[in-house]
Amino acid sequence: MTDIIKLTAAEIAAKIASGELTAVEVTEAHLARIDAVDEKVHAFLHIDREGALAQARAVDARRAAGEKLGPLAGVPLALKDIFTTEGVPTTVGSKILEGWLPPYDATLVKKLKAADVVVLGKTNMDEFAMGSSTENSAYGPTGNPWDLTRIPGGSGGGSSAALASYEAPLAIGTDTGGSIRQPAAVTGTVGVKPTYGGVSRYGMVAFSSSLDQGGPCARTVLDAALLHEAIAGHDPMDSTSIDAPVPQVVEAARNGSVAGMRVGVVKQFRGEGYQAGVVQRFDESVALLKELGAEIVELDCPSFDLALAAYYLIAPSECSSNLARFDAMRYGLRVGDDGTKSAEDVTALTREAGFGDEVKRRVILGTYALSSGYYDAYYGSAQKVRTLITQDFAKSFEQVDVIVSPTTPTTAFPIGERADDPMAMYLADVCTLPTNLAGNAAMSLPCGLAPEDGLPVGLQIIAPAMKDDRLYQVGAAVEAAFVEKWGHPLLEEAPSL
């Protein structure tokens, strides 16, 4: 089992294709790993054991029959519990949807099945993707496999922890303000936010519709590229889906190079609040890029300092609208329906019982920001700032091919440390938020361990919209250089469970 779970997704796919392993053997090895460690990690909310084994058997049968299968056929995956899965519970980390069985698959899930990827189950997350630590899950927090007393990032901490604990070689996350990249950074894994509209949102439970974006999570850049290619593409069911060819991400990951590239460093992405070890590893990464043949260009993006404030007006405003559908009338939890209460009373009681504190906080804030007399002062002003951020990116990409920064200002913080301080929690995403507001593509990959605590540090790479291949080109070059420099993948240093 140990040998199988330590393989990359690309290696697993190759061994299944050659007949050295069967999809059932691979699936059983990962299910056994989940049984062995997930009680400690709590990466999963639901294990679809029977469904996963049935998918694996189907892959083996089709392989035996000589059918041509996809490049990830038989590879297991952990799916963030925000995508609808027909007949399989989808809770979005909330009590308000506890036990709900969707009647259809999200487009992303359909693509995974069409690619013959084996879905092991649904992973833990901050309720409705609102959080940076997975502590806001109604079903309890997830631990970081590097140190189980620390957070695995959020909102997609379950997916990142499943990768870091070798419970799955691939995972899916969603990124509204950094919820793929920030968990990747603090767990020493790879996470990619594709260009907004590059991956369908149909069947993804909405938090903030103009910001939400599903994407791939993995332990290597190539694995992320293979998964990206499997889930991306135009979807007529999603009005925000981009009708354009998927960038050549796999080819870029196989041919990583930064020679002759112009790499931007934004002065706003450092300073007060940044951990010394994070800054040290980032500076080393910039020096490494220069060694590899990149030209480093200093950039000034003043509007980035306003991204946090703009995001926390836009995202709550959209969430207050999206979450209005959870009214106890159509699906999910219903409280107080004893025949004596009005529909309004039942809705209020259901939301009181079904939503957690962070969801309530954001709904109230967003409703206030959209209210008569305050719309222009708050939501309207935030959208103007969003335009300024987009313009700063546009000016920057006239000078550089990609931008790099730390993914997060600090390494993983202890569970509970910021639970009562929303502003401190929100600052975990200060480096990732501008990309969501502009709709660009971005990746986080490991760039070493912080010397003061021995925990992973993430390097963020940002590319223009629909230039997702640049992320993989740069990411693969950096990853290869790190492996050559230290002789082994960084994740092998993670404490065993």
Image: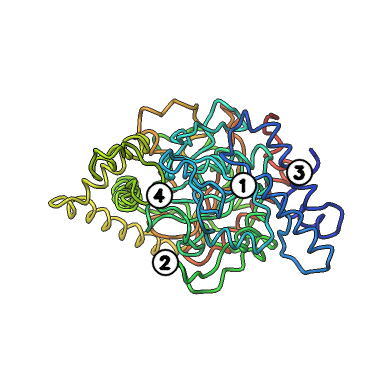
Q: Which quadrant of the figure has residue 337?
A: top left
The reply to whether dot 4 and dot 2 touch (C-beta < 8 Å) is no
| Above or below: residue 394 compared with residue 339 | below
The reply to whether dot 3 and dot 2 touch (C-beta < 8 Å) is no
Observer-side mark, 4 or 2, equals 4
The residue lying furthest to the front in this view is: 339
Q: Amino acid at mark 3?
A: Glu
Quarter holding the C terminus is top right
Label 1 secondary element: strand
Observer-side mark, 1 or 3, equals 3
Q: Nearer the viewer, residue 54 or 113?
A: 54
Q: Amino acid at mark 1?
A: Ala
x then y, percent, for residue 165 = 66, 37
Q: Amino acid at mark 2?
A: Thr
Q: Which mark is residue 240?
A: 2
Q: Nearer the viewer, residue 8 or 115?
A: 115
| Residue assigned mark 4 | 331
First of labels 4, 2 by sequence position? 2
| Above or below: residue 187 compared with residue 320 | above
Q: Which mark is residue 28?
A: 3
Q: Would residue 305 be seen by someone viewing this image from the given angle?
A: no
Label 3 secondary element: helix
Q: CA distance from mark 2 to mark 1?
A: 25 Å
| Residue assigned mark 1 | 78
The residue positioned 49% from the left and 42% from the top of the image is 99
The residue positioned 64% from the left and 53% from the top of the image is 221
The residue positioned 33% from the left and 39% from the top of the image is 350
**In the drawing, does residue 156 fall left or right of residue 378?**
right
**In the drawing, does residue 454 fall left or right of residue 376?**
right
> Would you call the spot at circle 2 few (<14 residues within 10 Å), some (14-19), or many (20 or more)?
some
